[in-house]
Amino acid sequence: MELGCERIGEVLVITPQTDRIDAAVAIKFKDEMRALTTDGPERIVLNLALVGFVDSSGLGAIVGAMKQLALGQQLELASLTPNVEKVFRLTRMDRVFRIHISVDDAIGEPLHAG
Amino acid sequence: MPADAPQDVVMAVSGPDAKVLHLSLSPTPDAVRDAHIRISAWMDSRDVGAVLRGNTEIVLGEALNNIVEHAFAKWAGTPAPSDAIRLEIRHRDTGLDVCIRDRGEKMPGLVLPTGQLPALSDQTELLPEGGFGWFLIRQLASGLVYYRQNGWNRLDLVIDDNTGAVEDLVSTA
């Protein structure tokens, strides 16, 4: 699985280049997220614009990617497609993650706003 | 590859206007992924609406993952027959009827999991990384019936066109 990675100011934006984060790729996704986020900045935005489907294994891997961050680092999400948004909403995980409409929206919004 | 080599996913359609999809697959995550691509293509050909389509992808994803991870846990890494899981989906006017059969281990206690949503902790390190599968199935499907017969598990369920609409009503109530 290919994860696009771009540093925009103080934010690391990671963009999975796949339309599915599912059981077939969940472990690999989590491992690659660890490699990209270790020694990274405080704010990490996972851009899910290309992902049309996340199953419970993929959801677990995204939660796992957050849990393996260093103290002070934070994983936020951006650009959820409708079916992915539904999985986060039904499982109440939309309350756990800070979710942005777009990457632009995420970049323009500092972590400690106000 | 010889023409008669076993395939991971075998698909056929039947009924007037290919109303019924039949699919056989081996119990591996890659075969499940491949099956989804074929189911998506069939739903395209049937003009299945976006909400029903999305719900179906979620429900079938969870149901098939559970079969691979639990019913066939003992088979992991060993070659399994390409028809160890058989899926039939029938397109009706108001939704999809789904029948999934598999030759894996029986459901513990011969009952379906209740599908409680795992508790979400305020502490990040205690957040659940799994256990959402049956919760999602029960949110989006109805008419769930499970039984065991002649060494096969059988799960019947219905995914209705209006499930998304009902759920939205509930969530905004």
Image (cartoon, coloured by chain):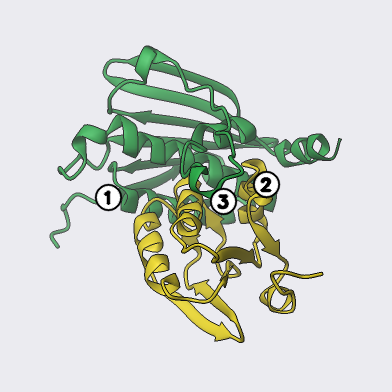
Q: In screen coordinates, is B81 left or right of A34?
A: left
Residue A17 vertical position relative to residue B30 in the rendered view, above or below: below
Amino acid marked by disc 3: Met
Report the residue marked by disc 3: B43
Q: Secondary structure at mark 1?
A: loop
Which residue is pictured at 47% across the width and 54% down the height?
A67
Q: Which chain is green?
A: B
Amino acid marked by disc 2: Arg
Q: Secondary structure at mark 2?
A: helix
Report the residue marked by disc 1: B8
Q: Name the mark on residue B147.
A: none
| Closer mark to the observer between disc 2 and disc 1 | 2
Residue B86 vertical position relative to residue A1 in the rendered view, above or below: above
Mark 3 — on which chain does it sit?
Answer: B
Residue that lies at the very extreme toward the right in this rendered image: B173
Disc 3 and disc 1: Cα gap in Å?
Answer: 20 Å
Q: Which chain is yellow?
A: A
Which residue is pictured at 35% across the width and 23% down the height?
B153
The answer to which of A104 and A96 lies nearer the viewer is A96
Quadrant where the N terminus of chain B lies? bottom left
Report the residue marked by disc 2: A89
Mark 2 — on which chain does it sit?
Answer: A
Disc 3 and disc 2: Cα gap in Å?
Answer: 24 Å
Q: Quadrant of residue B101?
A: top left
